[in-house]
Structure formats: C-alpha cells, structure tokens
Image: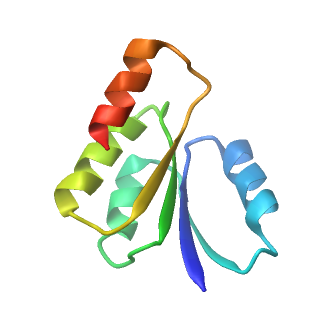
Amino acid sequence: MSTVLIVDDDPTARETLVAVLEGENYRLELAKDGYQALQVLGHLQPDLILLDIMMLRMNGIQVAENIRCMKLPTSILLLSIYSDAGFVHQAFTAL
C-alpha cells in the first residue's frame, strides 16, 4: 500500500484531499504545516507528498527545499492556485 503525506495548513483543503483519495487503497498521513511535515518525515518515508505552496509558518517551497536536503526518494506534488511564472519557476527550482 502506497503512503501519501498531505501537507496543508487549511483544514478544508486537507479534508478535500482526504475525501478524494480515501477508498483508493492509500495510507494517508496528514500534516497541518511544514514543521509538522518535517517531523513526520523523520519517521515516515511516504511514496508521495501533496504539498501546498502557500502556508503561513513555513511555505511549501521551504518545505520542499528541506525535503530535498534530506535526500528522500519521495515524489512531491506542489499544489497552488498561483500561475505567476516567477513563482512557478521558484517552486520548480526547490524540487
């Protein structure tokens, strides 16, 4: 069973992703912010991380940079409502 870590500071967004993925034979783990996500990654190696870019305490780009430094063999999917080219470039650079 594949493990998916959902990282979003918006409870409604987390619940929506859970609703979409539950029943699809994934083990779902949740983190309410980037700090909690990094703590979870200290003891869990998910197959996929669904990572919101716009979070208050630590944004998704910062979290992705930290994950990259950890050298985890994990795929990251950044979620954002923004389409600004500079912002998108910054996000891809973090990966």
Q: In this rendering, is residue 8 above or below 82? A: below
Q: Residue furthest bottom?
A: 1
Q: Quadrant of the C terminus?
A: top left
Q: Nearer the viewer, residue 15 or 25?
A: 25
Would you say 9 lies left or right of 88 here? right
Total numbered labels: 0
Q: Residue furthest left?
A: 69
Q: Nearer the viewer, residue 37 or 80?
A: 80
Q: Quadrant of the N terminus?
A: bottom right
Q: In this rendering, is residue 70 above or below 88? A: below
Q: Is residue 86 visible?
A: yes
Q: Where residue 19 sits in the image (x, y, percent)?
A: 81, 60
Q: Where residue 5 sits in the image (x, y, percent)?
A: 52, 64
Splitting the image into 4 quarters, where does residue 22 fall? Answer: bottom right
Q: Where residue 32 sits in the image (x, y, percent)?
A: 53, 52
Residue at horizontal 33%, vertical 46%?
Answer: 64
Q: In this rendering, is residue 11 above or below 27? A: above
Residue at horizontal 66%, vertical 77%?
Answer: 26
Q: Nearer the viewer, residue 41 or 21?
A: 21
Residue at horizontal 28%, vertical 55%?
Answer: 67
Would you say 32 lies left or right of 65 here? right
Residue at horizontal 33%, vertical 59%?
Answer: 38
Q: Is residue 58 visible?
A: no
Q: Where residue 82 sits in the image (x, y, percent)?
A: 56, 20
